[in-house]
Image (cartoon, rainbow, N blue to C red):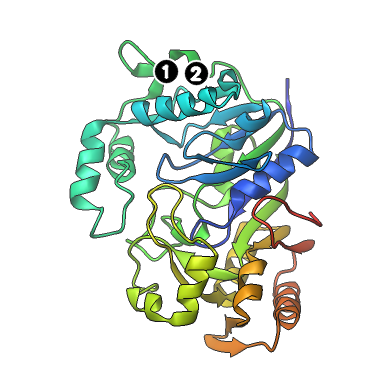
Amino acid sequence: MTIDNVDICCGLAWGDEAKGKIVLHLIKQHKYDFVCRWSGGSNAGHTIYINGIKYNTNIIPAGVFLGINSYIGPDCFINVDDFLQEVKTLKDNGFDTTVIKISPNAHVITNAHKDEDMKKYLKKQGSTGKGIAPCARDKFGRIGTLVKNIPGNPLKDYIFQGELFGNILCEGAQGFWLDINYGNYPFVTSSYTLPYSSCSLGFPPQKINKIYGAAKIYDTRVGVDPEFPNDLLNDTVLQQIVQIGQEFGTTTGRTRIPNWLNLDKLIKSINITGTTHVIISKIDVLHKISVFKYIFNDKLLDCPNLQDLLNTIRSLIHDNCSLVENIVFSDNPQFIEGL
């Protein structure tokens, strides 16, 4: 069997860009044989609405919600207890967890990794404390443990022994500006978040068709980063964005630090990722606060109304991003129109 087509959904900002909503929409609109996670671990998360009910996942791909093969790739990091608890929650809610597959070459996060993360990186670098960085260090130091090598393997029923085939949707974790190569190092994640790294799942780049890039109408960042100082939380308008937009981390519950949409950074992330379809969410939040600002050429600029802001964003992206075919603005946490 062969791989026919690959679509990718990636984050264009600092994570938390409503990728889960986009992935679910794509699964409903197209026939995919696999939905795959290519990087990260339980330090990331998706918020998914099924029949109006809200679900959160951390490491398991969103295909599980519709009974589609959900594959966790070899560049991911798995904590056995966290994974099994997530499986149990899904099973208890009536979802078919037999579709969940793990690469035998994914790396195992130990309790020692988590303890080290909590002590060294949680406060200093805004880590989630999930053990990702120490596990990644051991992976590249050639002293890590592969999923297939766990003694008395509690994950044996989920280890994938076959190969990907058919139509594949790759779902990104986190976002472009958290990538270990492109983010504000060392305030980055320990993974490759750009779509090219999805080839680690086992397909050539020639198979990639559409790249769906996710962003919000404003920026947010969880964790420590000098580019997002805590002082931003003192801005009364930005405080409204946090409250109305419910900007609290899916994985940790931490408050996301807000700022106005930086179009300089968004344009760069669109171009480097090769995004063909841009989806910008949370339009309704700015509509509710009636303040319409953005950053371009390092200047904070105002628009008189929401429509003018959307027209400006659309125009600047089309003028500066030659690969973009479609730009969609979304004002609903559960649905997308026009994609």
Q: 290 or 190: nearer the eye?
A: 290
User: Can the viewer see residue 324 in this picture?
Assistant: no
Position of residue 82 measured from the top left corner of the image (x, y, whole percent): 38, 31
Q: Is 238 positioned to the left or the right of 152 in the image? A: right
Q: 242 or 150: nearer the eye?
A: 242
Residue, disc 1? 155
Amino acid type at image mark 1: Leu
Q: Are marks 2 and 1 in contact (CB under 8 Å)?
A: yes
Position of residue 256 measured from the top left corner of the image (x, y, whole percent): 43, 63
Residue, disc 2? 158
> What residue is at 64 percent from the left and 65 percent from the top?
271
In the rendered view of the protein, which quadrant contains the C terminus?
bottom right
User: Within 10 angstroms of label 1, few (less than 14), some, or many (20 or more) residues?
Assistant: some
> What residue is at 23 percent from the left and 60 percent from the top?
124
> What residue is at 49 percent from the left and 18 percent from the top?
159
> What residue is at 48 percent from the left and 76 percent from the top?
238
Position of residue 253 measured from the top left corner of the image (x, y, whole percent): 39, 52
Q: Which residue extends farthest left?
A: 119
299 in relation to 264, above or below: below
320 in relation to 97, above or below: below
User: Within 10 angstroms of label 2, few (less than 14), some, or many (20 or more) residues?
Assistant: some
Position of residue 323 measured from the top left corner of the image (x, y, whole percent): 74, 63
Q: Is 112 positioned to the left or the right of 79 in the image? A: left
In the rendered view of the protein, which quadrant contains the N terminus?
top right
Amino acid type at image mark 2: Tyr
Q: 53 or 111: nearer the eye?
A: 53
